[in-house]
Amino acid sequence: MEFTHPIVIDPTGRDIHGEAARIRERGPVTPVELPHGVPAWAVSSAPLLKRLLTDPRVSKDAHLHWHRWLDGEVSPDWPLYTWVAVRSMFTAYGTDHKRLRTLVSKAFTARRTAELRPRIEEITAALLDRVAKAGADGGADGHPVDLREEFCYPLPIQVIGELLGLPEELGPELRTVVDSIFHTSADAAEVADTYARFYAVLGELVAAKRAAPGDDLTSALIAAREEESGTRLSEQELLDTLMLMISAGHETTVNLLDNAVHALLTQPDQLAHVRAGRASWDDVIEETLRAEAPVASLPLRYAVEDLPLGELGGPEGSVIRKGEAILAAYAAAGRDPEEHGPDAGAFDVTRAVKDHLAFGYGVHHCLGAPLGRLEARVALPALFERFPGLSLAVPANELRPVDSFISHGHRSLPVLTG
């Protein structure tokens, strides 16, 4: 394939679905231009993307397989630098990925996730009290509350903090740097500052847990050892694994909650299906993950060798060349008409098949997916039971998207809590 006339990705993500539709219109594999003119192939066909995500000829390790990285063409001031520079299971390939995932899986167990439910319920109840107070402070007529700020955002950050055993005093700094990781229009100074500050916070967390280990994920990661080789996570792998868990485990859940609330309030017929028992909260969660993917596009993967797409069910004669970058266009794939029919763009909790790629696919499927779903299963019904008259305080077209083409949510979600 010739890399000509690429779609220039808007780094601010102002129109995620419009851009995704334009990518789909150009075909299942489309040339796109990322910030700083970096080229990539966006894959928007759900079946083709699944095959690529499970193909051993596709890597996530820029250090091994991305020609621009190997040629020194990617500088630390690139807004997506952290996404490709880290050394964790997120960017590992082959046996190295298997080793890292095995170590992390030993620490991040199903039991550890399940045991968080009582605390998630307590945190949810406390945050809903805070929302109620913020709404009541406006007097008899109520006061608009930014639900993203007061509920959708603090719930996952508190949960991930408890999971990791994060000292309370590190919480505010952690929030700042996580926000910046997803700021894909950041300038060089912000990128460098974020990188340094994130590692500083993680270094303090690891030092605290080495001094006083606890029953938390950070302590478990420090102690995790591979049975066959006896190896542990290196210091860099440990820090980058924590970075991955904090970033992915927080932002995706914030957006899942945010987008679910937005979809139900802008389409009351869908909320009516839930209240009448025609659909469950699990239906809401899975349809939100499909139609409003919390991560719109995930950078990056790389062709280990030439990839003839016809062999994978893609366009005949099209080839992604060795060393070229691939962008997983999850928002576009979630609304792929080939997968979900002509109404793929509609949010419908009664849809029979809600298959999606919101948590990835194959060996890189997100380990934290059960935790994200658990938080949503607790938070969403609790919110709508506490505030049955919840409504948007501003027209939907006045809501601002987050400043990112990776993260898909709303910068604010003003609601009335009646």
Image (cartoon, rainbow, N blue to C red):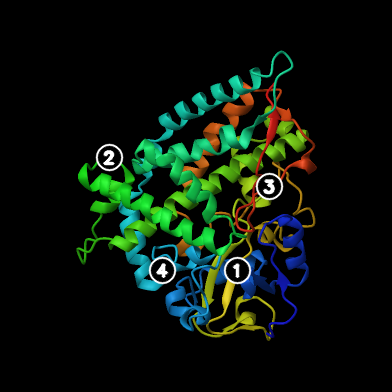
Q: Of marks 1 and 3, which one's residue comes earlier in the chain?
A: 1
| Left or right, 60 with reference to 357 | left
Residue 6 showing in the rendered view:
yes
Task: Specify which label sits upstream in the sequence, 3 or 2.
Answer: 2
Q: CA separation, marks 3 and 4?
A: 35 Å
Q: CA distance from mark 3 to mark 2?
A: 41 Å
On screen, 107 above or below 333?
A: above
Q: Number of marks in the image?
A: 4
Given the image, on which type of amino acid does mark 4 rest?
Answer: Ala
What residue is pinned by disc 2? Answer: 215
Looking at the rendered structure, the secondary structure element under dot 2 is loop
- In the rendered structure, are the residues bearing label 1 and label 3 in contact, judged by CB atoms less than 8 Å apart? no
Q: Which residue is the site of mark 4?
A: 92
- Image position, residue 100 (x, y; %): 34, 63
Q: Earlier in the sequence, mark 1 or mark 2?
A: 2
Badge 1 marks a residue whose secondary structure is strand
SS at badge 3 = loop
Q: Residues within 10 Å of mark 2 (few under 14, many from 20)?
A: few
The foreground one among 406 and 145 is 145
Residue visible at 64% across and 27% down?
384
* C-alpha distance separating marks 1 and 3: 28 Å
